[in-house]
Structures are given as structure tokens and as C-alpha cells.
Amino acid sequence: MSHYFDHLIIGSGLAGLAYALKIAEKNSGARIGILAKRNLNTGNTELAQGGIAAVISESDSLQQHTLDTLTAGAGLCRADVVEEMVCQGAERIQDLVNWGVKFDTNSESHSFSLTREGGHSARRILHVEDHTGADIHSHLLQKARTFKNIYFLEEHFAIDLILTQDAFPYTLGKNVCIGAYVLNKVTQEIFAIKAQKVVLATGGAGKIYQYTSNWSGATGDGIAMAFRAGARVANMEFMQFHPTCLYHPQSRNFLISEALRGEGAELINSKGEAFMKPYHPLGSLAPRDIVARSIDAEIKKSGADCVFLDITHKSETFLKSRFPAIYNRCLSLGINISESPIPVVPAAHYLCGGILCDSAGVTDIPNLLVLGESACTGLHGANRLASNSLLECLVLAHNAANSALIETDTSIRALEISPFPSQEHQISDELIVVSHMWEEVRRLMWNYMGIVRSNRRLERAKTRLKYIEQEIQEYYSKSQIHSDILELRNIALVAMLSVRCAQMRKESRGIHYNIDFPLSKSPLGPGVDSIVSSTSYYKR
Ligand code: FAD
Ligand code: SIN
């Protein structure tokens, strides 16, 4: 059995939904399919707290936002992409408003209430209290449901992309993406979905690390699928660690938004001393990489388990209305943030690298687009400026939909696709092995490819991952397809790609800090990105 959509969108987060809406608004005849491997509401978008960056205020400027992004990116951003994304800010915010999002406004002026986060030289973050992502997502989903030509497939796991040369081995010419093999997790059926445009909007890969702010499905599936299909990935060493995740035995991935520091919260150590100023003149509001490394150093120096974020100078009334989700979550764990500092630690948060593409999501593989956190457009360079990622999702979706609309090749619909290659199905009862391998990958990434790296640790990570990858491959070829195994296969590959990129970079830059190359190369010279292609990777 195979299905057909004009646009097959893999991912129901902000990137996928914005693309679907843009296409549906202009072409009511297009068949649009949106896949989600769990329910439609789960993903990193749902978790976004701080907000979305855009130049709205008259006291701000496009030049300042551009400069802040370039500064955070530590010399690795693509300047033309930065300029394009920043310039579209106000228009993309208007899209969200048109789709029903109501950002917080100031009670007197009714203008948007703008907050600040690390690395921003002006107040330019629009927000909906401290649950911006969930609010945006629910409005976009509601809007998408009003279109009859948008079809939702929940609990459908995309396994691999289908290329013309898989379906027709003797085809000459360029290998084109024509769909994906998909597992229906409810019926366990695997089938092909053909599409004129395949859009990877599968999000990030925080789950390759033991501690992360990400949702449990952030396993880099799109990146792994695209790489296996022959697309290049780049800058995978740049996993951004968020400095302040809640440190509590009952909650290891809840984020304490940077917006608290934007409202004056101070990082203090276990002796109650504010420790950031000696590390950076901006103190607690220094760029994220610096804050995360300083916390790491402070914890190592003191032997304490965590540091603390102190916002007790703000009133309970203010905290309850400005940060209701954080206030309530902490209170449910016995921490009243208006009275006591919040225990925090850094955790893997945002992948700046991903599938190489341009600012319209165009990848190396014809008909395959990538949007959102899976993409590497060059906006973030070596370190993402806070709240730029939601903006990037919107700009990419807008640009990609504009270029996808004008193409009308529907010949793919008629193609016969071979069924998914069958497995040997010898092992089916040992899912515990899968969870052991999951833990192993995530722990070794945390220990050897964490906030501070060294050549020796990276080599150790590579050696162990190579071995685990082989084991997984063997297990995968003999076991019944299950989403846990599919995710394991993907995290192992994405972890390995990250280590490979880290080893290529013989310097420290932005988020990537290697004690054996503590300085940044200057000048950077050509070949600034760490790029891995499957041709070189599978030769190793
Ligand atoms: P996601 O929203 O993660 O969606 C991924 C989708 O892909 C899901 O629907 C999932 O089911 C689907 N999927 C994945 N793999 C498969 C598969 N194999 N088959 C089928 N479906 C699949 N950014 C900001 O700009 N501002 C913020 O304030 C902010 N706060 C954040 C707070 C937290 C705690 C986190 C984790 C991130 C935050 N970010 C923030 C980053 C931002 O939220 C994400 O980068 C962005 O939402 C990613 O959107 P996306 O559409 O690319 O992916
Ligand atoms: C936060 O609210 O601190 C997260 C913002 C971001 O990751 O962009």
C-alpha cells in the first residue's frame, strides 16, 4: 500500500505547521500531510518559554538585532542569512497574529510587551507569559484544522526517505526524494508515502545527551534520515547548553527561562555569592555559552551539585503573573521562587547544526526540504542567540512555501514504490537491551562531548560510539521494527556525526570548547563549517 501527498511534512511543530498553513492558504487544492511520531502536541515548540525575537520597538533596529546574532554566532554565521531572517521579523510576527496568537501587551500603551535575554542589546522578545511555544502551537494547530486539505497522521514514525534510485536502481540522473517509509505505531504497519515535496521538520536532538531541556522525542530523526539518504550535515558540534535547567530529583528537564535573568535574576553559588561578573562584564546576562561554561567551572570548583538562580527581589504577584508556569512548577516541587533561589544546572538545549540548506530550506537532495531545528541555514553560526529559533522556523517555512508553490510536477503520484525491505525478525523480546544502549550513548555524550571537551575525550567517544553503532546495526537488522529501536539507531548516528564535527574543528569557538585548542582561529579562512557527507563517513 502507498499513499500520496503533494506536500509530506514530517513534524507538527512550529516549522511544519507554519509551512502547511502557508501552502494551504495559497493552494486549496494541494494535498498536505503532516506526520507526528507521537501526538500532534509534543515537540520542542510546545516547551518554548522565553519568546520570539523580532525588531518591533522604535528604540531597536534591524542592525542591532543583526549584530547581536552575528556576535553570538562567533564568526560562523552566514551574514546574508542573518540579515534576511532579521528583516522578516515583523512580518512573521504579523503572520502569528493573523493566525490568532495574542502576545502579551503593556497595560497602558497596548504595545507588545518586550523582554530581554542573554546577548540581546535591546528588549525585543515577544512572549505569551512564560509559555510562548505552547500558545503559538495551539493557535497554529487550531488554524490548520480548519483546512480540509491538511491531513494529520499522529503516531506515524518516518523511518527513512525514499529516493528515485532506491525505487528504480537503474535510473540515470540526479537522485530525487519521492517520499518516506512510515511506521504506523498503532497498527505496526509499514508503508510508503509518496510526495512531490518532502519536508523534514523533525526538530532537534537534545536526547543524544543524558541531561537535556528537550522533549523525549528529540532524537534527531530527520538529520539521521537525510544523512543516510546522502544529504550533507554540518556544524553538529554546536549543541547549545542552556545554563539554567531545574535541578531537582523529580524533574531533570524543566527549563528555567533566560527571561528570568532578563528581569534581573542573579546566578549565585552555594555560598550565596553572585559569581558571574568575574567571568563576563554582562554578568548573569552574558551569552549562553559563557554562562554555561562558568556554571560548569563553578560546580567543578565547589564540588556542589548545582548553582542557584535568585529572583527573590521580585514580588510574588509579579512572578505569578509574568512566569506562571515556572512559578507553579517550582511550587509543586516545594520551591517558592519569590522566597528562595532556584537550584539550576546546564543541560543540552538546542542544536545549532543540522542538515545543510539555504534560507528556503533547500537541501542537497532535490524535492527534500528541511525547516526548523533540523536545519543548518547559517543563522546561528557557532552559538544561537536566544529566541532566534522560533523566528527561524517561521522565516524558513515562509520562504520554502513560496518556492514550493510554483512547482507543479505531480508525476510522482503515479510511481510504483517497492515495499519496505523486510527484516529477519529474530529478536523481538529484548527491548531492555535497547534502553541500555540508549543510556550508554547519552551518558558517554554527556561525559566525553559535554560543555568542556578535549581531544582524548572526543577520541574515546568516537571509539565507543563506533562499537555501539555496529551493535545497533546488527540488532536493527534482526529485530522487529519498533520506534525505540528506530530512535536508538538515529541517536547513535547523530551522536557520531556530532563527535566527527567536533574532531574536525581544531579550535574553540562559540559553544564548542576544546581544552586542547583553547583559542579561536583567526582569521577563520575558507571551509569554516564542519561538514560531514555520507560518502566520506561510510568509508571510515
Ligand atoms: P519541534 O517543535 O521539536 O517538532 C518536531 C516534530 O517532528 C514533532 O511533531 C515530532 O513528532 C516530529 N517528528 C520527529 N521525528 C519524527 C519521525 N521520525 N517521524 C514522524 N515525526 C517525527 N526557541 C525560541 O526561539 N524561543 C524560546 O523561548 C525557546 N524556548 C525553548 C525552551 C525549551 C525547553 C526548548 C526545548 C526549546 C526552546 N526553544 C526556544 C527552541 C525552539 O522551541 C525549537 O527550536 C523549535 O520549537 C523547534 O521547532 P521544530 O518545528 O523544528 O521542531
Ligand atoms: C528560554 O526561555 O530561556 C529559552 C529561550 C531560547 O532557547 O531561545
Image (cartoon, grey):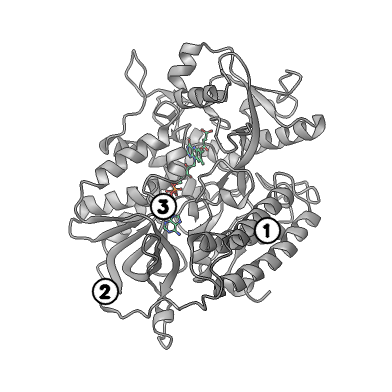
Name the residue rendered at 37%, 80% in the picture: 418
Name the kind of residue labelled 1 in the image: Val
Residue bearing the label numbered 3: 38
Name the residue rendered at 65%, 69% in the picture: 471
Name the residue rendered at 61%, 73% in the picture: 474
Residue bearing the label numbered 2: 413
Q: Is residue 508 above or below residue 412?
A: above
Q: Quadrant of the C terminus?
A: bottom right
**SS at mark 1?**
helix
Image position of 77 (left or right of 392): right
Q: Among all residues in the image, which is located at the extreme front?
A: 429
> Is the shortest distance between ligand 1 and the CB of mark 3 under 8 Å?
yes
Q: Residues within 10 Å of mark 2 (few under 14, many from 20)?
A: some
**SS at mark 2?**
helix
Q: Position of residue 3 (x, y in %)?
A: 29, 69
Q: Position of residue 146 (x, y in %)?
A: 20, 46
Distance between the Cα atoms at labels 1 and 3? 28 Å
Q: Position of residue 252 (x, y in %)?
A: 60, 37
Q: Quadrant of the N terminus?
A: bottom left
